[in-house]
Amino acid sequence: MQGYNQQTYPRSIENSVNILETNISEISTVSSWATHMGYSRSYFSTSFSEYFGEPPSRCLKRKRYQCLHKMILQFPYETSRAIALRLGFGDEQALYKFLRRHYNTNFTEVRNKLLNGKA
C-alpha cells in the first residue's frame, strides 16, 4: 500500500477531531465516528491513523476522558449518571466501566482529584 502525505487526505480527516469534540455525546465508537464522517470504519481508521499517527480508538478514548474532566469542572455537583449521559455513555455503569477499563479509576476518584487540584 502506498503511503499518504497530508495533502492527499480529504479535509474532513483533518477536521475529524474537531467534529468529534463537537459531537462527543453522539459518537461513542470508532464506527459511529466513521459513519458521522461519511466513511467506512476501515477507511476512516486507516486514514486517521496515517494522518494523526495514532489509531482513532486511542484518540476517542482520550477525548472522552478530557471531556469528562471539563464536565466535572463545569458541573462539579452533577451526578455521575447526568455526566455520563452528557458524554454519550448509556448510563453511569458504562462510564464506570470505561474509567475502570482504560484508566483504572472511578468517577468519584476523578472528581475528587479534579476538585481538590490533584489532577
Image (cartoon, grey):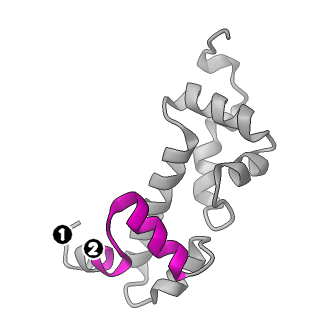
- Mark 1 neighbour density, 10 Å: few (under 14) some (14–19) many (20 or more): few
Q: Is 105 in the magenta? A: yes
Depicted 104 relative to depicted 73: above or below: above
Depicted 54 relative to depicted 101: above or below: above
Badge count: 2
Helix, strand or loop at mark 2: helix
Q: Residue 3, image x and y in percent? A: 62, 12
Q: Is residue 109 left or right of residue 77?
A: left
Residue 37 appears in which quarter of the rendering? top right
Q: Residue at x 49, y 54 (%)?
A: 61
Q: Which residues are magenta?
A: 92-111
Q: Is residue 54 left or right of residue 108?
A: right
Q: Is residue 32 left or right of residue 119?
A: right
Q: Which residue is mark 2?
A: 114
Q: Which residue is mark 1?
A: 118
Q: Is disc 2 in contact with disc 1, using a CB cutoff of under 8 Å?
A: yes
Q: What kind of residue is marked 2?
A: Leu
User: Quadrant where the C terminus lies?
Assistant: bottom left
Residue 16 appears in which quarter of the rendering? top right
Q: Residue at x 61, y 33 (%)?
A: 48
Q: Residue at x 23, y 74 (%)?
A: 113
- Between residues 70 and 49, which one lies in front from this camera angle? 49
Q: Residue 95, image x and y in percent? A: 50, 73
- Between residues 73 and 32, which one lies in front from this camera angle? 32
Q: What kind of residue is marked 1?
A: Lys
Q: Residue at x 52, y 79 (%)?
A: 93
- Between residues 98 and 37, which one lies in front from this camera angle? 98
- Mark 2 neighbour density, 10 Å: few (under 14) some (14–19) many (20 or more): some
User: Quadrant where the N terminus lies?
Assistant: top right
Magenta segment's dominant SS is helix
Q: Residue 12, image x and y in percent? A: 71, 37
Task: Measure how far apart labels 2 and 1 are at the Cα level.
Answer: 6 Å
